[in-house]
Image: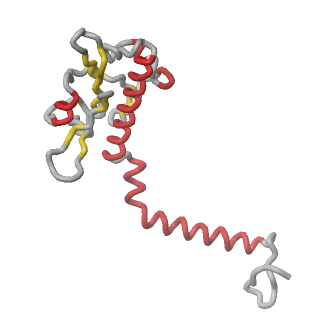
Amino acid sequence: MNGSRNSKQGEKLSSTDPSRDRWIIGMLGGLVFCYLLCMGPELVEWFAGSPKAKTSQVFNNMKDCQIAAEKYADEHDGLYPKSATDDDFRARYAGRKAPINPFSNLPEWPVDGNVTNVDEARRKLDWQVGKGVVEYSSIGDSKGETRSYAVRGGDQTGAPISLRTGKPPFKAVVLSNR
């Protein structure tokens, strides 16, 4: 006979023996308990939505805005939307729905911004936009045609999402075709 030993000496357990199933369930339960005990604080933070996770979602919303702007330009001879409120631009979003602001848990379209120079916007950290708000700025060329754009987003304080790695000066995250 094949199988593992039961508590009764000399008897073997078959694969259909209920005591074998109880043993497996007990072991799995113990493993889950140990995992939850060790990972509890991180799981609570994850389920509650840590500021870091929410800021990451804002960054994803910024990328969605960038993708929508690029799709718009593909269909408009390389010109980008002049405003974040352009219905044709909003139609380029997945599902034609406004992204969810992770700090308010409400759908919010990007707002119009005032960036005119992408490099300068990346160096500038002294602006406020609002918690989780995404800002879209159209940037015109010398002919007044919108050939570029800038997308910025606000973190848990409404300050710009920035790259805070390494040594200062830190830089704001600004998505653009430049």
Q: Is residue 143 shown above or below 167?
A: above
Quadrant position of residue 37: bottom left
Q: Is residue 103 shown above or below 27?
A: above
Quadrant, the C terminus: top left
Camera-side residue of 119 and 174: 119
| Residue 78 left/right relative to 119 | right
Picture coordinates of residue 12, whole percent (x, y): 81, 83
Quadrant position of residue 160: top left
| Residue 57 left/right relative to 11 | left
Picture coordinates of residue 15, whole percent (x, y): 80, 71
Extreme-bottom residue of the structure: 9
Extreme-top residue of the structure: 143
Q: Is residue 44 shown above or below 131?
A: below
The residue that appears at 37% across and 27% down in the rendered structure is: 66
| Residue 127 left/right relative to 72 | left
Report how many numbered discs are placed on residues in the image: 0
The residue that appears at 69% across and 71% down in the rendered structure is: 22
Picture coordinates of residue 21, whole percent (x, y): 72, 69
The residue that appears at 32% across and 41% down in the rendered structure is: 55
Extreme-right residue of the structure: 1
Camera-side residue of 89 and 45: 89
| Residue 86 left/right relative to 36 | left
Colour scheme of the rendered structure: secondary structure
Picture coordinates of residue 49, whole percent (x, y): 37, 45
The residue that appears at 30% across and 33% down in the rendered structure is: 132
Camera-side residue of 5 and 154: 154
Quadrant, the N terminus: bottom right
